[in-house]
Each structure stands twice: as C-alpha cells, then as structure tokens.
Image (cartoon, rainbow, N blue to C red):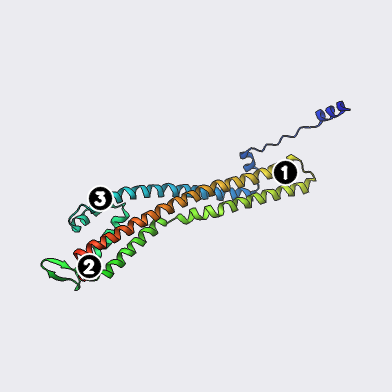
C-alpha cells in the first residue's frame, strides 16, 4: 500500500515556483508595479530631502555659533553689520540684518531725536519688534520647507503599499477562479507581489517619519534660539537707542 503512494509521488510532476523578490516584481501586474514605482520615487525624494536638510542644519548651527560669539563681543552694531556676509548660513544673522536695517530706517526718519549729546535716541520700537517677528517667522518657514513630502510619505506610504497588497491578493483569487486550483503555483506569485508591496510601503514610510520628527525637533530648537536672540537684541537696543522704553 505504502509502496503505491511512494510510486505515485515519484511519478507526479514537480512544480517549481520561483518567488524571489526580483521575479515577483518583474511578474507583478502593471497596477502593482506602478504602486511600487510611486513608493520608490517617494522614498528617493525623502532621502534626498533628508540629506539636504541635514546639511542645512549643520551649516546653520555652525554659523549661528560663530555669529552669536561675535555678537556678544562687539562694541558696535555697525561693525557687526559690516561683517554680516561672513555668516550667510546663519538664520540668527539674517534676523539681525533685518533688525539692523529697520533701525537704520528709523534713524533716518523724523522719529529720530538727538536728546543725549551725539547719541541717537529713537522711537518706534513697535516697528522694530514687528520686523524681528516677521524675520523669525520667515526663517522658520524656510526650515519647514519640503517637510510636507516627508509627512505625506510617512502617513500615506503604508496605505499605498496596502493598495498593492490588496490588488495582488485579488489577482491570486482571480487566478484561482480561472484555473479552479488553489495550488502554490497559482497563488504564490500574487501573494509574493502583495507582500513585497507591503514591505516597500513600510520601507518608504518608516524613514520618512523618523526624518520628519527629527527635523521638526531641530526646527523647534532653532525657534527657541531665534526667540532668545530676539529678546536679547530688543533689550539691548531699548536700553541704548530707544527713548521712553
């Protein structure tokens, strides 16, 4: 009896099913392949944004440290402004530049009152505060640029991959209906492409979320740095240049 089963098993043709990743992608349906292309493109964009943002933050931090070190050592805002081009990567320096130019406009307007010898005493501190706040907002807005791509990829990547997964499983059921067989050779290709779609969706989304959270944290720290500098700068100019403050 057992010998008959052994002979039948030996006589049955073996079915080879190739389910490697590359073969599964190559044999996937056009819809799944398009889904994978979208995920790969999004992932490439995310890594490119992550690299450029990292370089931007690194240069900005170095330039900010150099500028703030110089700011607390100089005795004249004019001399600091003359060297402002040395700190082109510093967001704090750009805020200072905007504030300095506004102070210069105020000093050249009728608001100027020379009441303490040769020392100019200004009014119009509200205008200066608005300019500083606007400069801070512009700097934060620049830093937040293109982060929406990371946020979008992180939130939609798994769902895009899930769409490919559902489509691949649907294809497997369709083949079962067409052939009337649920053998491995029938369902394996569809299941394989479905799982690959899920994996690539997660591979695109997870780094995007990590990068997004990291950059948001850096931006919040930079916002604190800008706010602290703005407060210190306003205190200095109020004491030395503005009247009635």
- Do the numbered discs 3 and 2 sit on residues whose CB atoms are within 8 Å? no
- Quarter residue 186 falls in: top right
Instruction: Answer left or right for 157 relative to 147.
Output: right
Q: CA distance from mark 3 to mark 1?
A: 67 Å
Image x and y of residue 196, in percent? 62, 44
Q: Secondary structure at mark 2?
A: helix
* Up-down relation of residue 120 to residue 195 (above or below): below
Instruction: Answer left or right for 38 relative to 189.
Output: left
- Label 3 vs 1, first from the N-terminus: 3
Q: CA distance from mark 1 to mark 2?
A: 75 Å
Q: Circle 2 sits on which residue? A: 105
Q: Residue at x 32, y 55 (%)?
A: 91
Instruction: Answer left or right for 26 relative to 67.
Output: right
- Label 3 vs 2, first from the N-terminus: 3
Q: Secondary structure at mark 3?
A: helix
Q: Which mark is residue 187?
A: 1
Q: Circle 3 sits on which residue? A: 69
Image x and y of residue 149, in percent? 48, 54
Instruction: Answer left or right for 27 relative to 117.
Output: right
């Amino acid at each position: 009896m057992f010998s008959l089963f052994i002979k039948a098993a030996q006589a049955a043709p073996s079915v080879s099913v190739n389910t490697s990743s590359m073969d599964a992608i190559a044999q996937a349906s056009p819809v799944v392949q398009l889904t994978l292309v979208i995920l790969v493109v999004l992932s490439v964009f995310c890594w490119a944004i992550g690299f450029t943002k990292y370089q931007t933050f690194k240069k900005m931090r170095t330039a900010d440290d150099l500028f703030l070190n110089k700011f607390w050592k100089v005795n004249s805002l004019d001399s600091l402004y003359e060297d402002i081009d040395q700190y082109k990567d510093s967001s704090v320096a750009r805020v200072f530049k905007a504030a300095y130019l506004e102070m210069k406009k105020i000093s050249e307007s009728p608001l100027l009152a020379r009441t303490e010898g040769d020392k100019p005493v200004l009014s119009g501190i509200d205008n200066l505060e608005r300019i500083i706040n606007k400069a801070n907002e512009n700097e934060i807005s620049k830093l937040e640029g293109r982060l929406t791509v990371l946020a979008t990829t992180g939130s939609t990547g798994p769902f895009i991959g899930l769409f490919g997964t559902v489509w691949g499983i649907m294809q497997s059921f369709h083949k079962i209906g067409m052939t009337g067989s649920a053998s491995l050779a029938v369902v394996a290709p569809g299941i394989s492409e479905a799982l690959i779609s899920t994996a690539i969706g997660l591979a695109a989304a997870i780094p995007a979320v990590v990068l997004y959270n990291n950059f948001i944290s850096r931006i919040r720290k930079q916002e604190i740095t800008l706010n602290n500098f703005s407060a210190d700068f306003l205190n200095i100019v109020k004491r030395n240049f503005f009247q009635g403050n």
